[in-house]
Image: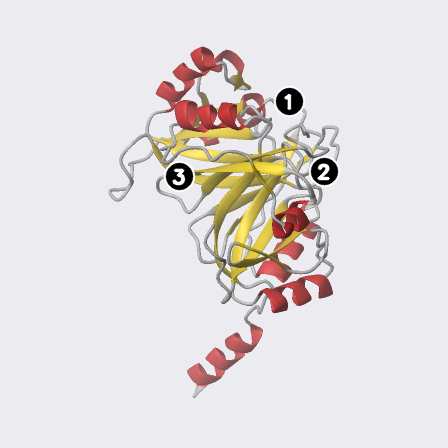
Amino acid sequence: MINTLVCALLMLQAPNPPVSIQAGGNMLLQSANLERSIEFYRDFVGLPDMGAVRPFTPLTAGLADLYLAPGAQYRPKTLMVPGSDLRVELIEFRNVDAHPVHPKLQDPGATIITFNVRDVESVAARAERSGVHMITPGGKPATLEGGKARGIFVKDPSGFYVEIVQRNEPIPANAPPGNVIGARLAITVKDTDETLRFYRDIFGFEPQSGAFMADKAFTDAAGVPATTQYRKSTALITNSNLYVDFYEYRGVDRTPMKAVIHDPGVAIMRLMVKDIIASLKGAKALGMPIVNWSGEPTMEAGYWFFMARDPNYFFFEVQQPSEIRPLPR
């Protein structure tokens, strides 16, 4: 009887987020030059490349609404990340008024994609001959996490921050072949408490919050001023194996990022939901900014979409499959 009552109470207290995630992992990166971005993630990072690049095509009415880009053309390219639910989806627009954004790592809205690898030395060796923008001094892997890992920080051609890290621990037996064996995401935030409340209330995340700390090895490797302290919190995206770290910095000047959804340098996480109407209604009720043109779900290629953002100008493309299938093109 007692166990039954406890279970019932836990069910009553369980979070019931308005945006109930069924799947997540596509990380959309607005690219300034698609070919250069592909070369970076394929040839430098080492992601597998499957399929040809599509030519520029006009945006449909649904995509024009989603990306605030009527009359524009675009071309996307998706690269899979071995060992992770993360997919890197690169998008380049043209015929649109775009303003590239280049936040510093400590600026709210900046992002880092961390790729876990078997051998960081081989990736670092490719940096100079590939013309990669190296951030870590000397271009050599730095010792991180008190000796638990070695890594380098770089920028991709559009200015996104990327960390390549090799952990000093046995590689799991089920790790994929090849050098890249996993990934995670990090977002720089303005205020940790505000951000964690947002992700808890909107998505039902269960973040683990950290305290401010000084970590010279990290700040030196990442190109952040030595006076900086940071606070790191972590959450798992529901129904995925993708972790998100939230970094708040202090002791350094910070400029919150402001951008339009189609600007090069903007990052977007695509999330699949079961009920897009309920998700939109619940998100609006909790004050989540909806940023696509109509402010309502729009349809493209058999899916309903809306675009929203968090308090730090990190964007979300929320989607649900439609029962109405598109006509063949």
Residue 171, picture quadrant? top left
Q: Amino acid at mark 1?
A: Ala
One can see residue 233 in this view: no
Of 197 and 91, which appears nearest the observer? 91
Q: Residue at x 39, y 21 (%)?
A: 123
Of the two numbered discs 1 and 3 on the same chain, state the one appearing first in sequence: 3
Of the two numbered discs 2 and 1 on the same chain, state the one appearing first in sequence: 1
Residue 205 coordinates in the image, percent (x, y): 55, 57
The residues bearing labels 2 and 1 have C-alpha atoms spaced at a distance of 28 Å
Residue beneath label 3, please?
81
Residue beneath label 1, please?
226
Q: Residue at x 42, y 27 (%)?
A: 45
- In the rendered structure, are the residues bearing label 1 and label 3 in contact, judged by CB atoms less than 8 Å apart? no
Q: Nearer the viewer, mark 2 or mark 1?
A: 2
Residue 223 coordinates in the image, percent (x, y): 60, 22
Q: Is residue 150 above or below residue 230?
A: above
Q: Is residue 237 above or below residue 52?
A: below
Residue beneath label 2, please?
259
Q: Amino acid at mark 3?
A: Val
In terms of secondary structure, where does tag 2 sit?
A: loop
- In the rendered structure, are the residues bearing label 2 and label 1 in contact, judged by CB atoms less than 8 Å apart? no
Q: Residue at x 72, y 56 (%)?
A: 294
Characterize the local packing of mark 1: few (<14), some (14-19) or many (20 or more) Cα atoms within 10 angstroms: some
